[in-house]
Amino acid sequence: MNTVLMGSLQHCCCQMPKTGDTWAQLPWPGPPHPAMLLISLLLAAGLMHSDAGTSCPVLCTCRNQVVDCSSQRLFSVPPDLPMDTRNLSLAHNRIAAVPPGYLTCYMELRVLDLRNNSLMELPRGLFLHAKRLAHLDLSYNNFSHVPADMFQEAHGLVHIDLSHNPWLRRVHPHAFQGLVQLRDLDLSYGGLAFLSLEALEDLPGLVTLQIGGNPWVCGCTMEPLLKWLRNRIQRCTADSQLAECRGPPEVEGAPLFSLTEESFKACHLTLTLDDYLFIAFVGFVVSIASVATNFLLGITANCCHRWSKASEEEEI
């Protein structure tokens, strides 16, 4: 049953029926009657309209190229949407997976709302044919990572919301590669402790970045990202008040954007040859002192043992 469904989704209603051979086999009926011609035109117009907008899925409402299937307790995505769908809302359901090729037929899609579901991942190549997709909402789901090919070929994306994914621990350095039109990116209230600078530096149009509510570890590895953000803060709105460090202990609770180059001074300390020689010398002295101390403790213990034994013999 799943195989049949997948096939219907991938090949769906994108194919037009071949009628050329059928018409070639029919005999010429002669000049058409005006009334019959009018009826034929009306029927053809109705058929074309029906083909362009497939019937609305059960439990959904369809109007003006907007398909709303939200809050219907759906466990799977509805099949066979109208082909001219521009706005698709599947929010507030229980959808755990989106089948591969689901968006193949819907080339007019501009907005896809999948918030508040049970999604853990998206199939590879989901957006290959959704060239016009601009707004994507994946908030309030169960994503644990954002792989490199998650938004493959979705070059028209302007807004991505990945907020409130509590298990989101990792964003691949190439996760947003090629999204040159991306203006708004929301990664707030997840489980991110680190974010690679490489994931953001190739987003020339980025205007709004939300990263607050994550357990950021503000160690040396975070310095490149923070330096980049400080240079962009004038033209990139960020939730600076909500972004705080959870570690290490010396900066716990500090606002992420309050850290300066002085905060990472220890990350740039380098040792010279004299430093290494001094450390080696100190180590050598400490080891000699340790050996001497153990030697003295051994002699002391031996003397105490002999003295104790001599005392016992005198008493006898």
Image (cartoon, grey):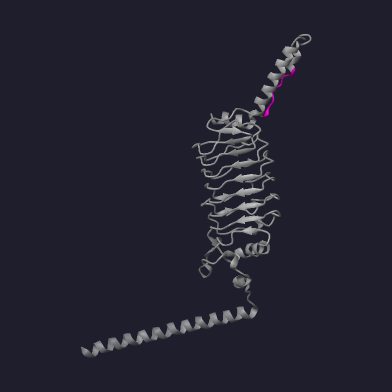
Decide whether residue 237 is among the magenta residues.
no
Q: Where is residue 175 in the image (x, y as percent from the top left)?
A: 64, 51
Nearer the observer, 131 or 21: 131
Q: Is residue 184 left or right of residue 217?
A: right
Q: Is residue 281 above or below residue 80?
A: below
Q: Where is residue 235 in the image (x, y as percent from the top left)?
A: 68, 59
- Residue at (60, 63) in percent of width and height: 222
The residue at the far left in this view is 316
The residue at the far bottom in this view is 314
Q: Position of residue 72 (x, y in %)?
A: 50, 36
- Residue at (66, 33) in percent of width and height: 84
Q: Is residue 301 left or right of residue 115?
A: left
Q: In this view, does 35 lie to the left or right of 273?
A: right
The residue at the far right in this view is 31
Q: In this view, does 53 lie above or below 250?
A: above
Q: Position of residue 53 (x, y in %)?
A: 64, 29
User: In which quadrant is the C terminus drawn?
Assistant: bottom left
